[in-house]
Image: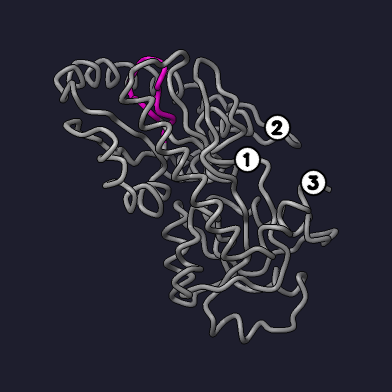
Amino acid sequence: MTAAAERLGITHGAVSRRILSLEQWLGTPVFERLGRGVRPTPQGTIFLRRAERSLNAIEALRSELGSRRDPGAIRISALPSMVRLWLMPRLRRLEAIAPGRTIEIIPEHRMAQVQNRDMDIAVRYGTGSWPGVDTHLLFPDIAIPAATPELAARLAGISARDLMKETLLIDGDSSDWQEWGRRAGIQRTLLGSKRQFLDHDVAIEASRQGLGVILLRAPMAASALYDKSLQALPFPAILSMRAHYIAVRAGERRPDVLALIDELRSIGAEATAHFNGAFPEIAAQAFDAQGN
């Protein structure tokens, strides 16, 4: 599961969630759980073989159709939540770096293949180590318990352990909240009720509706704190072991692509500095905890 998450550039929880959805759709398990690992069931092996044939046919068609796309376009792939929360508000600034070129923002959950120029640039979430690509840090990932001001007022004075018994909003599965509980000093984390969503921006909207407590990811989703629709709760913020990276084909030399990479890095650094300046205590707490 961890290797799959790294390969796809998504969280471990998102992988688990997708497998569960696949099994529910098929009506049969595709993996057998063995302690901390898994192995494919006979049905899973059959599904894999047939799915591979179908996917290869789809890829061949995609390549054929893709050859007809605008040759002057620069394509940037990112998770849908990253696109909606962070990239789209900055599109005009990116377009100014490449005048006369079309910039296509492609929201997708799959891992874009920049090695074969399926995409020109990919924004990925992970450790920053992927074969065949060069990576540049966009910004870190700080997880902050947050809620509406009304819900925050109701939760005033409760412990971290009691917070875990509240309705938690989850994108992927509960592994992020489990990790937060562990690093907050809770030896055995027992979650209360939860509401699950596939994408972080959807979970944020649910939190804005007062449907529960979210682990808000900053700087990516810090706008929800800036506009005060959500507020950070007085609990530890943690710096994730993973971060958001810009990935391009190894040895990329196209001037327009390199210029966009430089601009993305500048915007990412500005976003990090803005967040650290707006919430210095949260930033210091997260980075100090990681250092310890």
Quarter of the rendering containing residue 156: bottom right
Amino acid under disc 3:
Gly
Depth-wise, is mark 2 or mark 3 nearer the camera? 3
- Say left or right for 102 vs 258: left
Could you say which disc has been placed on residue 37 in the image?
A: 2
- Residue placed most toward the observer, 62 or 112: 112
Could you say which disc has been placed on residue 291 in the image?
A: 3
Amino acid under disc 1:
Arg
- Calculate the distance from the C-alpha at mark 3 to the C-alpha at mark 1: 14 Å
Could you say which disc has been placed on residue 169 in the image?
A: none
Dot 1 surroundings within 10 Å: few (below 14), some, or many (20 or more)? some
Task: Check disc 1 and report its element: helix, strand or loop.
Answer: strand
Prevailing SS of the magenta stretch: loop
Whichever of labels 3 and 1 marks the residue nearer the N terminus, that label is 1
Residue 9: x percent and y percent?
51, 34
- Residue placed most toward the observer, 291 or 4: 291
Question: Which residue is pictured at 51% across the width and 73% down the height?
Answer: 230
Task: Check disc 2 and report its element: helix, strand or loop.
Answer: strand
Is mark 3 in CB contact (under 8 Å) with mark 1? no
